[in-house]
Amino acid sequence: MGSGQPRGRGGARPTLEEVAARAGVGRGTVSRVINGSPRVSEQTRAAVEEAVAELGYVPNTAARALAANRTDSIAVVVPEPESRFFAEPYFSDIIHGVGTALADTDMQLLLTFAGGDRERRSLAQYLSAHRVDGVLLVSVHADDPLPDLLQQLDIPAVISGRRSADEPLASVDSDNFAGARAAVDHLLDRGRRTIATITGRLDVYGAQRRLDGYRDALTEAGHPVDEALTARGDFTEDGGRRAMTELLARRPDLDAVFAGSDVMAAGARQILREEGRRIPDDVALVGFDDSAIARHMDPPLTSVRQPITEMGRTMTDVLLAEIADTRPAAARRLARRQIVLPTELVRRASS
Amino acid sequence: MGSGQPRGRGGARPTLEEVAARAGVGRGTVSRVINGSPRVSEQTRAAVEEAVAELGYVPNTAARALAANRTDSIAVVVPEPESRFFAEPYFSDIIHGVGTALADTDMQLLLTFAGGDRERRSLAQYLSAHRVDGVLLVSVHADDPLPDLLQQLDIPAVISGRRSADEPLASVDSDNFAGARAAVDHLLDRGRRTIATITGRLDVYGAQRRLDGYRDALTEAGHPVDEALTARGDFTEDGGRRAMTELLARRPDLDAVFAGSDVMAAGARQILREEGRRIPDDVALVGFDDSAIARHMDPPLTSVRQPITEMGRTMTDVLLAEIADTRPAAARRLARRQIVLPTELVRRASS
DNA sequence: ATCACACATGGGAGCGCTCCCACCCTACCC
DNA sequence: GGGTAGGGTGGGAGCGCTCCCATGTGTGAT
């Protein structure tokens, strides 16, 4: 169909101007229709829409971005070197949630990879230059410069895994504290009394909160918190093994372990088995994340489920709201939302 | 530093023109320097680079895209409704590989979610309108209209998981055939003689190739292929369970199972255990994918590892090469590359 | 000294859109 | 009947860049 000389790959695509000509109206009117402005009469709108359909017109994003100074796209910053983020199921699920939230809009999703601190610093400039409308930050370290830079540049951003209790950026987290409490309460219910914990890296706020929850549950139940029952891991399987070995050496009488992640629980399980401890008969084991590992472990692992997909969706919703917010920067700053989503204990055979 | 009235969020950013003024040269010259053209004298280049550094200039992507009719970005199409793609470890690893390959370039990565066929159809138009420079297609069904549409629109694309032996698009796959052969050869080596297989959905070409490899290994070893030993799964755990139940009913004497995916192997394992068959003593089990599940299963699952991250990297390299190729469409079509990457058998306790 | 040519450079003309101002026309009011 | 809104509309003026042509400017051959 249609001839006209093709201009590069994909052939020529109709422009706003051509739609306007076809519909017998001006450029401005077509623009108004495309952008859903109410200031267009019903019949004009119909005529334009018909022309759009006939020509198969789709607006040119680049031109729109240039003229309107917005990109209709947001970026997810992927902390590349950290395998934890790429580890199951975090990454996929977050992205899935983001995708779901974005499906209703015509926003695009950009994936950017941040390496070390140097790269992160240049990334901030990069992001602002590319005029991404907003940024989703996941799994950020306490000393990461990126969040502050984004705030300084006044680029809307939402963080998952807040850096501290008073995170200045909008944030969405799961309730690590309550999740840990539920896990430990469950172990107490099961009659366990010597409950150890393997923590994640404590410079990750969420890991600290899980430890807090563990302590709180014990204290509230009237049990003293024995520091010998706390071992520090680093979210890796190997760290889980080391921590478990340590715990067993310090307190051979322990009868339960709450691990700050499923992966660490897997490492712990291996040591427990090597040492001849039966799960759950001798030692009950509970993890955190409810990843695929938990379901397939032997015995299947009781774990605290985080609503990760929902976190991705919520983050996106919050970000879109921030982007849409046209009030002055100060007002926007005050309105920043800190959202905490509930966790859920999934009981399986390991406890 | 600098005043000037800010224009929207993020403040005003320097333009090419300002850099040119600062360096005392014309716009064209700055453009040449930015884009690495050789037709600039050494000292002019130095002057421009200094001005760029002083001003912290970063080119405006939208303007560049509009003027040059290219976007410096590629899209990964995510087949959203299929959980298989989001399942461990495919998605993360592919993306990881793509990110690695993109790190050396200044290309951006766009994630687009394709729902049903309708959405996919409109997506093609969308992609061409957004002027993505190229598209990465993963996990495509035999009857997906998107690949053909992309070809029709002459948008560079690379597919992973080719649809058939004569895939017209450039493709990158792992060697499913050889991987399956290696798995079955390994079982034969172990002295197993009644080897069953659980296939994935056979409208996925890779699943068919795995079945082919299974048959080929048996035939070559002088064993007849017994159709009763082949059961069809669908890549899900539940499908694995159903297939295993079927197989056990048909051939209670089987002594090994080659599953077309780790997830299906997990399902099979569950049935085997319920039926009182010990792994590997009574029945040896081998999976495909070498996912986290395989490492954490009990006993750890022997599995065929696919170099998924490398596939992502290779796909991206091929795509970038296609984008850079300026020859006429016909010549480009002829040069399309079909790459097959080697798999590797990872031996664990299940066999 | 003259011509030719390559190389380096400046800047006009757009890319396709949004924004906004000016304009027109049709009520509606005094 | 004239004045006044105000909704509806057209189109100029950019957004910041690349492309390309025109214009120097220096070098070597004639």
Image (spheres, coloured by chain):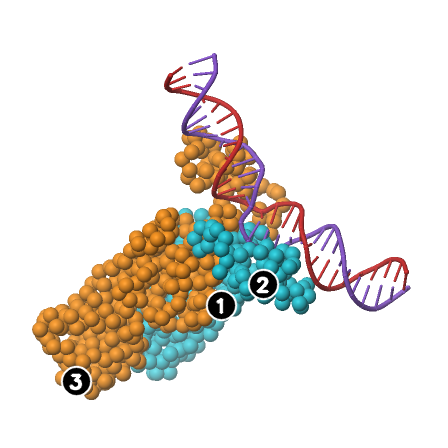
Chain colours: A orange, B cyan, C red, D purple
> Which mark is on residue B103?
1
State whether discs 2 and 3 lie on one chain: no
Give residue B193's quadrant in the image: bottom left
Q: Secondary structure at mark 2?
A: helix
* Nearest to N terminus: mark 2 or mark 1: 2
Q: Is residue B3 left or right of residue A175?
A: right
What x and y, as percent, mark residue B69? 57, 52
Q: In the rendered structure, the residue with mark 1 lies on which chain?
A: B
Q: Nearer the viewer, residue B97 or B288?
A: B97
Q: Which residue is mark 3?
A: A251
If the image is split into quadrants, where does the C terminus of chain B sit?
A: bottom left
Q: Residue C14 placed where, x, y %? A: 61, 45
Going by the numbered disc 1, the residue's amino acid type is Ala
Q: Would you name the residue on which mark 2 appears? A: B51
Q: Secondary structure at mark 1?
A: helix
Residue A124 shown left or right of residue A22 in the figure: left
Please provide percent x and percent y for residue C22: 53, 31
Question: Helix or strand or loop: what does disc 3 sit on?
Answer: loop
